[in-house]
Image (cartoon, rainbow, N blue to C red):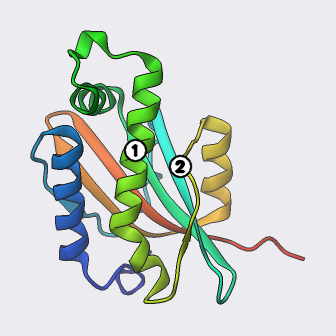
Amino acid sequence: MAESDCPNDIAEVAHSLSKAWEFLSGEERMFQYVPESDDPLPIAEFSFYMPLKLPADARRGGVGVLIQRDDAIHVAANMFGVARQQVQNDDLRDACAEVCNVFTDCMASHFGGGQRVEIGLPRQAGPADYEIFAESCVTRAVYQGCAATQRLLIVLYDSVPSPS
């Protein structure tokens, strides 16, 4: 991913993501743009994606959110007002889907460059899904929010059209 391919307002996106995480988790965490790297993005236990489409030119892509278990528990406990020990697996999936939804809202306008963007529904990505994404998508921008050993990644990507 070349820096010229990333959203124009890197600082604005990072700030929006930081504010969104604070709203969702009750925790302050600074997000920052991650410069281009050859390292593959690691799948997380709670990897979610939100498909995006530009109807004007049929371009497709989306936002991926890679959440580690400890962050998932933290955000679910905050969202549902329960102790960390009381969080159930369904709570984790629901909370992570909502994180994906909110983070997509922070990044969708940058996908379309001012065009109308159609936003799908958040979906959890297992290892097989993740492998398909790795082979069929081009990363446009990556943001991360780190706290202690936790690394939360948000990925804006374009889908590569399949050959006809």
Q: Amino acid at mark 2?
A: Pro
Q: Going 18% across and 57% down the picture, which residue do you hit?
A: 18
In this rendering, the answer to whether 153 lies above or below 77 is below
The residues tagged by marks 2 and 1 sit, at their Cα atoms, a distance apart of: 8 Å
> In the picture provided, is 67 more to the left or to the right than 9?
right
Q: Bin the neighbour count of mark 1 within 10 Å (Cα to Cα): few under 14, some 14-19, many 20 and up.
A: some
| Mark 1 residue element | helix
- Nearer to us in this view, 84 or 127: 84
- Nearer to us in this view, 72 or 88: 88
**Residue 142 position in % (x across, y down):** 36, 63
Furthest residue in direction front, as rendered: 81
The residue indicated by pointer 1 is: 98
Q: Amino acid at mark 1?
A: Glu
Q: Bin the neighbour count of mark 2 within 10 Å (Cα to Cα): few under 14, some 14-19, many 20 and up.
A: many
Furthest residue in direction top, as rendered: 85
**Residue 67 position in % (x across, y down):** 37, 39
Answer whether labels 2 and 1 touch (C-beta < 8 Å): yes
> In the picture provided, is 61 more to the left or to the right than 27?
right
Find residue 143 and report its image quarter: bottom left
In this rendering, the answer to whether 161 lies above or below 75 is below
The residue indicated by pointer 2 is: 122
Q: Going 23% across and 18% down the picture, which residue do you hit?
A: 82
